[in-house]
Amino acid sequence: MAKTATRGRRKAPARGKSRARSSGGLLPWAVIGIAAVGGIVAHDNWKSLQPLLERQSTPIAREMAEPRPVARKDVPPKQVALAAPTPRAAPTALQAPPLPPAAIPTPAIQPIKAMPAPASPGAQQTATGAFGYCGQGAHINCVGDGGVFWYKGEKIVIADMASPVADQARCDDERRVAFAAKLRLLALLNAGPFTIDAAGKTESPGAPRIVSRDGRSFGAQLIKEGLARKPGAAGGAWCAA
């Protein structure tokens, strides 16, 4: 009795399996049938279904055609440069009022010393200055020979004497006297102030003058010292016969 019970229990699962197999075998046929019926219906209504299929396939085709950007893992993300904040301008200090321009120093005007006018003929003049020998330059205050000198550019000829000229000497003694007279006149002019008087009534420039100091004529002193002679006297006495 026990064996028969076990046998009946074991056969029961076999029936369930056969039922599952039979139901699983019918499902594919049902799907095929449905697909066939759907195909027949679609064929009959193809003209009405075609616009609907094109509308749905267009966006799908566009999505498939457009390439999607592929994110690369090895490319670092772009760094967005942040704009540096603009520094605030420091408050400007109050500007001082413009200073007035500095005064331009005005050079002091030196008074021009009035140069005494040269001695005019017929007038007495007191003269003084430093004299030297005349050279090739301008004759200002200089001695030309024993009886001629320049005072402030004016030629003065001593009227009351005649002395030899070195360039025109006819002998050595006359030349020696000419140099000595020139040296002596230079010493008299540099000794101090002297006066220049017109000789006669002549008014022409360079006319003979009387030159003296303390009332004593330079011409008379040179004659006394043997370095000059009176005007018109023979000059050959300085040369030996």
Image (cartoon, rainbow, N blue to C red):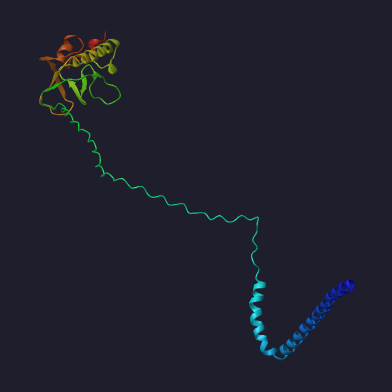
Query: For this rendering, which residue is in front, 46 or 203?
Result: 46
Compared to residue 160, the image places residue 77 above or below, namely below
Apparent side of residue 198 relative to residue 87 in the rendered image (left or right): left
Query: What residue appears at the point 21 percent right and 20 percent down from the top-left corner?
Result: 148
Q: Residue 192 location, x and y as percent? A: 16, 16
Q: Quadrant of residue 68?
A: bottom right
What is the tally of numbered marks visible in this picture? 0
Query: What residue appears at the point 72 percent right and 91 percent down from the top-left corner?
Result: 44
Q: Residue 38 location, x and y as percent? A: 73, 87
Compared to residue 156, the image places residue 178 above or below, namely above
Apparent side of residue 81 relative to residue 194 in the rendered image (left or right): right
Query: For this rendering, which residue is in front, 86 or 3?
Result: 3
Q: Residue 155 location, x and y as percent? A: 20, 24
Q: Residue 34 location, x and y as percent? A: 75, 85
Query: For this rendering, which residue is in front, 122 or 53?
Result: 53
Image quadrant holding the N terminus, namely: bottom right
Image quadrant holding the C terminus, namely: top left
Q: Quadrant of residue 20?
A: bottom right
Can you name the residue that lies furthest to the bottom here? Answer: 44
Apparent side of residue 132 relative to residue 4 in the rendered image (left or right): left
Query: For this rendering, which residue is in front, 10 or 117?
Result: 10
Q: Quadrant of residue 194?
A: top left
Compared to residue 85, the image places residue 124 above or below, namely above
